[in-house]
């Protein structure tokens, strides 16, 4: 193992979503839409790794407020179970805001909850379209 292998984060998943109406939309990571951190796949994630979601919410508008959230869930026979707010440590997700947003969110996996869901919510307004991009990284524990 080289020093480069030790310090380079692994891209676990990338996803996108677009929101233009009053609704909540899940970020789409392909099939399945949510991210399953498989405990048996050490090429994807090791238990001592740290997960970080890097999110950009981009818009040309400045009118409608949009928020971002992270959920985790148990496994239900290979599908996502009932989601709840994920553990983001001492990081508090910001309140809904207008314009562009850039977030770096730590995510702590809880025992028995290997699924992650990322969501964007528009509380009111239909003037702006927001495009959301999320890159989920696994950062080696030694970094």
Image (spheres, helix red, strand yellow):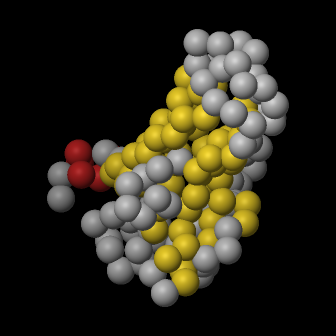
Residue 105 horizontal/vertical position (percent): 61, 44
> For the image shown, how many numbered marks are present on the structure?
0
Closer to us: 135 or 19: 19
**Quadrant in the rendering for residue 96:** top right
Closer to us: 82 or 143: 82
Q: Residue furthest bottom?
A: 77
> Residue at coordinates 75% horizontally, 15% vertically from top-left?
63
- Visible residue check, residue 109: yes
> Residue at coordinates 58% horizontally, 19% vertically from top-left?
59
Q: Is residue 61 above or below residue 72?
A: above
Q: Is residue 61 above or below residue 15?
A: above
- Visible residue check, residue 94: no
Residue 137 horizontal/vertical position (percent): 43, 49
> Residue at coordinates 38% horizontally, 61% vertically from top-left?
31
Q: Is residue 9 left or right of residue 57?
A: left
Residue 94 horizontal/vertical position (percent): 76, 35
Q: Is residue 20 above or below residue 27?
A: above
Closer to us: 101 or 17: 17
> Residue at coordinates 65% horizontally, 42% vertically from top-left?
120
Q: Is residue 142 left or right of residue 59?
A: left
Q: Residue furthest left?
A: 1
Q: Is residue 52 above or below residue 99?
A: below
Q: Is residue 40 left or right of residue 108?
A: left
Report the quarter where the N terminus lies: bottom left
Residue 82 horizontal/vertical position (percent): 67, 74
**Quadrant in the rendering for residue 112:** bottom right
């Amino acid at each position: 193992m080289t020093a480069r292998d030790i310090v380079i984060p692994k891209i676990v998943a990338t996803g996108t979503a677009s929101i233009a109406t009053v609704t909540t939309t899940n970020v789409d990571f392909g099939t399945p839409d949510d991210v399953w951190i498989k405990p048996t796949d050490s090429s994807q994630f090791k238990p001592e790794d740290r997960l970080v979601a890097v999110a950009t919410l981009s818009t040309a508008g400045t009118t409608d407020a949009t928020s971002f959230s992270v959920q985790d869930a148990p496994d239900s026979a290979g599908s996502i179970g009932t989601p709840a707010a994920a553990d983001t440590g001492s990081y508090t997700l910001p309140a809904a805001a207008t314009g562009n947003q850039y977030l770096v969110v730590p995510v702590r996996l809880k025992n028995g909850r290997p699924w992650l869901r990322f969501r964007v919510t528009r509380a009111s307004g239909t003037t702006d379209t927001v495009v959301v991009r999320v890159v989920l990284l696994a950062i080696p524990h030694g970094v």
